[in-house]
Structures are given as structure tokens and as C-alpha cells.
Amino acid sequence: MKLNKFVDQLPIMNTLQPLERDIHGSYYEVSMEEFRQKLHRDLRPTRVWGYNRQFPGPTFDVNQGEQIQVKWMNHLPEKHILPVDKSFHHLAHLPEVRTVVHLHGSETKPESDGYPEAWYTRNFKETGPVFKKEIYEYPNRQRPATLWYHDHAMGITRLNVYSGLSGMYIIRNEQEKRRNLPEGKYEVPLMIQDRSFNEDGSLFYPQGPDDAGDNLPHPSIVPAFNGDTILVNGKVWPYFEVEPRKYRFRILNASNTRGYQLSLESKEPFYQIGSDGGLLRKTVKLNQLSLEPAERADVIIDFQGHPGENLILKNDLGPDADPDDETDEIMQFRVSADASEKDSSTLPKNLSHIPSLKQNNIHAIRNLKLAGSEDEYGRPLLLLDNKKWVDPVSEKPRLGTTEIWSFTNITGFAHPIHIHLVQFQVLDRQPFDLDQYNKDGSIIFTGPTTAPNLNERGWKDTITAPSAQITRVIAHFAPYTGDYVWHCHILEHEDYDMMRPFRVVDENEEKS
Ligand code: C2O
Ligand code: CU
Ligand code: CU
């Protein structure tokens, strides 16, 4: 289906208002529903799922230290809008539509973290084996950052998020407000996603692999899915009218599988000021910005030198790209001739203080493999440390201690690895000989360790672990004990079976 680019205006998600607000905090209600929404001028309204009848969902805008409660109400139908593979995780025995919301990047107690098995169905009728909670609490004690919320239900996260269940969540504080960064209408969230459409305007998601043999289950999960159409804030290839001045964009890759290599036409740079967990130490000037699924980049773009021009936000598909692939463009900025007011915002060089976790005592080093295998149908089955989701908990960091997690990627492609509860720091990466590893299991390094990229030297919750490299991160496990998860954020991998539980334990528990 051929859709014209840059014919629809970029929508900005509404900010969610609390139903009640008192000294203890704010109370919100959000309902998950099925509805139709116009995603492009020439598409008939598409059946999607969203929060409060919006795709993407409304944006939370909260202050640091402001505790909030959210009642996440499932009002979805009992039948999914996408093909559900029920051949794994005993999904055949579970209700087809189930949801649970995770606030990605947040420091939240386990019972409010959206544990995959804490799912529930329409009107909270049926619940998964753990937690059984519909009202979640977010303390918002962490530093200001761009977080996002999305569905996390066991085995169908890829389908629920693809259907539309994601939204932005911004934490602010006074200190950051005093930085005089572009704000108000000059501060804009950009949620980038890829989708494919059927002729009738409905969402397309594969029933199974293209080369599926008859022996596969129907529908059958695919190991990766890239849509052929790019949406920003729920519109296909939109345009955005800007003034010739500085803007702050909070960019999120909320795609299932697709990573982006963003750049601006006219070689205008990005000034990245923040990563997943908030402001960096120093502003980083970038001509190209890479964003794997779930990663966020807080950037300033200065349109001052381009009055009256149109600039396209591009996506570099690499030298081997198919010339018909249209995903090399994301959106268009239309710069007006004049600014409506003087731009008094600043672009600071130094941004924030980030203590290095390297100074801490290291309580444990965990060597964890990202590995591939096959299931009984011959389908790829990706695993963390060769364990499945159902295997017993093996990672039990002690509350308040610091650990190094070392990800050895022996698969042929990169995985964006995400750990719940914490914001971590990246130590380094080191390449090794994968052929040698495949022959005899030995790790022979082929180069020195490399420091993280400049824009990875802040707080991260999701990190690219490239093929044939060891990627090391360091994390302080606090402030809560209990059950969390870590996983690859390619949703097709996460669902099957690249996700593992981990448990933060207190001292006594650890001994037992
Ligand atoms: Cu954004 Cu566990 O995920
Ligand atoms: Cu998360
Ligand atoms: Cu992966």
C-alpha cells in the first residue's frame, strides 16, 4: 500500500490529568480500549488498541517525588486484533487477551512493575498467577527522565504493543526547569514506530514466517518484524511546523524490532542532552543518532539557520538497502520564515552530575550469554544464558549492592538488553572471534575494549549488545527487593524466550 509522505501534521499526545490530587499524591485512571483512529490522510480509520482511546496513549507529566497511583483498566475485547500464536508458554490455556502495564525505566516496587505474569483480562475478571493488582503506584523518586509505559503481558507483548498500547511518561524537577532548556510548545515528544497496513487500512502483522512449512503452528511467532511504514506519535510520516529556533525533542524508539540511524537533512546536528535515565554529564553533538528498541534520546535541534526550509529526519538504511524501502525517512520539519518570539532558551555544555558506579564495591560479576537455539518446530528460539523463562530464578542481586553484568552475544545480530528497576552505566564492549567460539567455545578477543559511545555515558536502562562482542554494564540494585525481569527489547525476542526473571533479595534471603 503506497502512502504519501508528509501530508499529515504531527499529533502531540494529550497530557493526562489526575482525577484527584492531595498531599499524598495524585490518582489517575486509564482505560485500555479498542477503537478506530485515522493514521494517515488516505487510510481508512484503523482499528487499534490504546490508552484512554488514544494511540499513542496520553503523556504522564509528573514531578520528581510526586507519588502517583494509576488504575489501569482493561476494557479490551476478548478477541485479539492480531494473530496470536498459542504454541508456547502454555498460552493455549490462558485467555487470549490479557494485559499488564510496565513503566519502562522506572524505579517501582515489584507489584507495580508490570510483571509479565501479573496480567489480567477485561474488567479484571481473570488474573495471572502473581500480584493481582489493578492500581499501580509510582513513587517517582528517581531523577528526571523520559520514561515510557507499555504493555508487558506474558507471550503477547509484541502484539499488544503493536496494536497500540504504549505512551510517554516524563519526570521533571525544579533543577532541570532552571536549566532554561526549550520548553512548552518547544519541547516535543517523538514516539517512532514502524507498522504495515493491509489494503483496508487495518494493521498487518504476519501470521507466521514467510517460508513457513506445514508443520508450524498457525499462527506462528516470527523471530523479527519490520513494518514498511514509519509513524511518529501515531501518524504515518508526518510533518511538523517549527520556528527557526531551538527545540527539545524527547525521542523514543517504540518499535517492535526496528532500530534507527537518525540524521537530519542539511547536516544539521543533534545535540543530545539526555539518555534513558535523564540528563547526560555533557551535551554530545551528533550527526547520526542510533536508537534501538526502547532507547530514548533527549535532543536539542536548532532550526535557526533554516528559515523557510523543509528538513527531513532521515533513517540511514545502510549501503545494501532496497531502493524501494521507504523507511529511510521518518518525518519532515517545516521551518517557518520567522520566529514568533525571541529564543531565550539555552543549550548548556555541562548538564548534570553523574557519580560513577565504578567506585563502588563490586558484589558480583555475572557472565550472561545471549544465545540462539531451536524449538521442536525448528523455529529460532533465543535465550538468555541458555535458560528459558520458566527455569528457576538464577540472578539474585542483594539489595543495595553493585554488580557487573557482562553480556556475551554469540548470536549473529545485536540485541537491546533491558533490566527492570535500575538505571545502569555502561562499562565497555570488547569484540571476540565468534567462529572460534562456535568451534570450541573459547573466547578469543580480536580487539581491545572500547569505551561506551559519548551518548551512552549517562544512565541507561536499555543497551545495545552487538554480535560477537561482550558488553558490560554496572548497576546498583536498589531501592526495592522482589521479582523483576530483564530481557531483550526486540519484542519478538522477549516473547519467545529472551526474557528472564531476577530477584533482588535482602541479606537473609540470600543465605537460604
Ligand atoms: Cu520496556 Cu520490560 O520493558
Ligand atoms: Cu522496563
Ligand atoms: Cu533480541
Image (cartoon, rainbow, N blue to C red):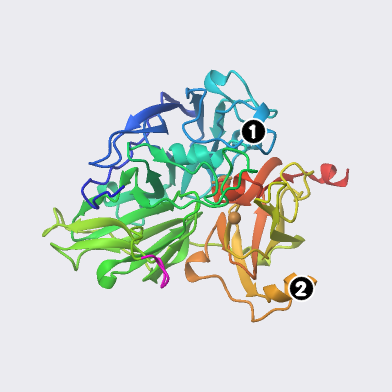
Res 111 label:
1
Q: Please give left or right for residue 143 compared with residue 192 in the image.
A: right
The Cα atoms of the two marked residues, 1 and 2, are separated by 44 Å
> Which one is in front, 118 or 326?
326
Q: Quadrant of residue 350?
A: bottom left
- The amino acid at mark 1 is Glu
Q: Quadrant of residue 439?
A: bottom right
Q: Which residue is mark 2?
A: 439
Residue at horizontal 62%, vertical 71%?
429
**Mark nearer the N terminus (1 vs 2):** 1
Residue at horizontal 30%, vertical 33%?
45
**Label 1 crowd (10 A; few <14 / some 14-19 / many >=20):** some
Residue at horizontal 71%, vertical 59%?
403
> Of helix, strand and loop, which mostly describes the magenta segment?
loop
Label 2: element kind? helix
| Magenta region | 317-322
